[in-house]
Amino acid sequence: MLFSEIFVQDFLKQRLINIVNSGRVSHAQLFLGQEGTHALGLAVAYAQYINCANRTDTDACGVCPSCVKYNNLAHPDLHFFFPNTTTKSVSKDNESSRFYKEWREIFKETNGLFSLEDWFEKLGVENKQAIINKLDVERILELQTTKAYEADYKVFIIWLPEKIFASMAHKLLKCLEEPDGRTLFLLVSEKQEQILPTIVSRLQLVKIPKFNTQQFVEVVSQNTGCTADRALEIANLTDNNLIAAFNEQRYETDTKEYYTLFVNMMRSAYRICYFTAYPAKVQFPETIALVKELESLGREKQKLFLQYALVLVRKCILMNTGGGQLVQSSAEEAAWLANFHPYINMQNGEKVMEAIDDAIRDIGMNAHSGILFSGILFTDLVLVLGQLIRLGDPKMGK
């Protein structure tokens, strides 16, 4: 991939180019970006630039033998490691190299913009957990002792190192501490806090921020079939998630539907908060109807709804902390938030976001657990939100 194909801030690309051209390439780096950033694509473009035979001051050439192989993700000195599990076609001894065909396909289909759930779907993973397992770690240890075939650097790109099998993570430390000088480790993570701290301490951090809304709208409207208005709608719905924008046909969104569901969820939670001392009395028909409606959405739309809920929660917090001028909303959203925002504040805002984040994570980790699981999840979420609204309600006290 070329830097010109990557959707991140220009200053970040230039920073990486300067590092290479000054000869200050660190042997172990952490590319840290939330889901919806182009962090994985950036890591590949950076590796391609390093090994390009005719790189310029702005990009790799794209046509030298090294670049041609990188463009096909088929360079003999480029190694990928990523979460995987047994599938119908790989029933045992699963390791990343056995899924390179699917990896190259999804990478080319999405330009490197895909989520862990998209990858699970590509693999046809059912009710299983995917990790970077013992076989993968042992393969890294084996390969890092060999010489590069062709390139200046042999490159190990580890996507989502937070998924490395816990008991094996410490075995990577020696690789990161004692490289051979021509080996480059690029770890691409969404959640630094879930990586072994001793590993993080050995990595040079490259932080990939999300685009702000204006940048997001510009990038999406110029590089997809979306109008600027539609791009703004996606930005507000997904908190500037590029994966959703560039794969819009896979994320059928309906802002009006999610807005209505959010309002109903918060109203149900608000009513429930008056009955937290008497949980047996919480039998509101509207809450039961809400949970059934959320059950029926399907996994991807459930996640999108919760991501939309996070966006509105952040808007409430901004409005309570003097940042109301930064909030962009439709007229309907703005009118409702004007009345609701006092209930999500510094007392409870962080915990509300944690509760919703946990629900998103649980949906992702239990993708095929069925309606019963999602019904329990959303019932619990409404109950937790009720308690948190009570915590933050200035009229009710703690």
Image: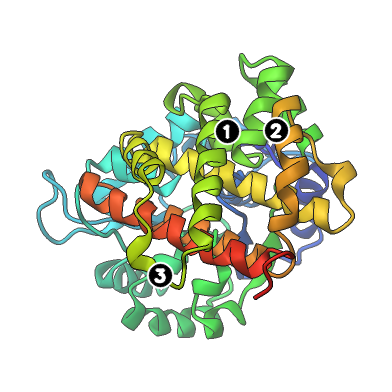
Name the residue located 80 percent from the left edge and 53 percent from the top edge.
318
Task: Tell me which numbered mark, 2 or 1, is placed earlier along the sequence.
Answer: 1
Q: Which residue is mark 2?
A: 333
Instruction: Determine whether, in the image, residue 372 is placed left or right of residue 249.
Output: left
- Residue 62 on image: x %, y %: 62, 32
Q: Which residue is mark 1?
A: 259
Dot 1: what SS?
helix
Disc 3 to disc 1, how far (Cα)? Answer: 29 Å
> Mark 2 belongs to which amino acid?
Glu
Return the mark for residue 188: none
Dot 2: what SS?
helix
Residue 70 position (above or below residue 254): below
- The foreground one among 13 and 249 is 249
Return the mark for residue 278: 3
Instruction: Determine whether, in the image, residue 212 is placed left or right of residue 349.
Output: right
Mark whose residue sits in front, 3 or 1: 3
Disc 2 to disc 3, how far (Cα)? Answer: 32 Å
Residue 131 position (above or below residue 234): below
> Mark 3 belongs to which amino acid?
Tyr
Quarter assignment of residue 36 = top right
- Residue 326 on image: x %, y %: 85, 43
> Mark 1 belongs to which amino acid?
Tyr
Mark whose residue sits in front, 2 or 3: 3
